[in-house]
Amino acid sequence: MSGNNNSGTSGEMTFWGHLDVLRAMLIKAALIVGVLTVVLFAVMPDIFDSIILAPCDGDFVLYRALDGIGVVNSLLPELSGSGFHVDIVNIRLASQFFIHVSASFWLALVLSVPALMFLLWDFVSPALYSSERRGVRFAFLFGNIMFFLGVAVGYFVVFPLTLRFLADYHVSSLVANTISLDSYMDNFLMIVLVMGIVFELPLLAWLLGRMGIISREIFSRYRRHAIVVLLVGAAMITPTGDPFTLSVVFLPLYFLWEIASFLVPARKNVAEV
């Protein structure tokens, strides 16, 4: 994409020229994800054993940490990793192969986020003013950091707690839990990816603030309402009556709210941003 960097326009290139540049960017993105998918496919059995299925064992890092806290403070819930284990079974003939492929693709997509964001930045930056480039550069950097932070929270905190609760939950003592591979991966991917997306909310709030759509006063006015909504959301993500587990999920969500509040300018300064 070629343009006049001083004027912030791209009038030197025709519509078809822009389309060619966009097509080249999409091809590069597809190649990055495709190559990384192939590489991950080759090592996926090891990734499954050491990473994806790690929350199924009692020696997972979160369980050990909670066990240590529980020894110190007896008021915390009993979440000892001792004796905890979830067996995953496969009940469909082709599930293991298709999950092998799909897990390789989704993990490749997650790991490719910085490269994909760079390609997007390289595509749009020539059409921006110098001041706009500084803001967008911050947005791309901040967006990458928050996405991977959300993925980490989803993997190390939210998913293990959800698995711990649901795997041990029984509507009746006569019904045994048998966790299928498809069910496990559906919940694993959904929670980890959703948390990565949820952690982009401060970036979305910052962009809406720069556009003058929202202001910091909105966050102050509706803070109490937000706390209630976030508590409900945390309860839905981790459906347990345990207040400690609920707070472990709620606090990162509330932290995101406060970050968004800090990033959004006050109404009197919106026009200046």
Image (cartoon, helix red, strand yellow):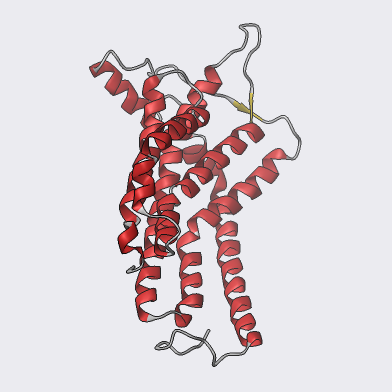
Q: Residue at coordinates 45% horizontally, 56% vertically from top-left?
A: 204
Q: Residue at coordinates 65% horizontally, 43% vertically from top-left?
A: 99
Q: Is residue 45 positioned above or below 207 on the image? A: above
The location of residue 167, given as percent across then percent down, is: 55, 21
The location of residue 56, given as percent across then percent down, is: 50, 28
Q: Is residue 148 positioned above or below 33 on the image? A: above
Q: Residue at coordinates 52% horizontally, 35% vertically from top-left?
A: 53
Q: Is residue 194 positioned above or below 176 on the image? A: below
Q: Nearer the viewer, residue 105 or 202?
A: 202
Quadrant where the C terminus is found in the figure: bottom left
User: In the rendered view, does 89 fall on the left or right side of 206?
Assistant: right
Q: Nearer the viewer, residue 205 or 114?
A: 205
The location of residue 178, given as percent across then percent down, is: 64, 21
Farthest residue to the bottom: give it: 12
Q: Nearer the viewer, residue 166 or 98?
A: 166
User: In the rendered view, does 93 fall on the left or right side of 117?
Assistant: right
Q: Residue at coordinates 57% horizontally, 90% vertically from top-left?
A: 13
Farthest residue to the front: give it: 268
User: In the rendered view, does 247 fall on the left or right side of 29?
Assistant: left
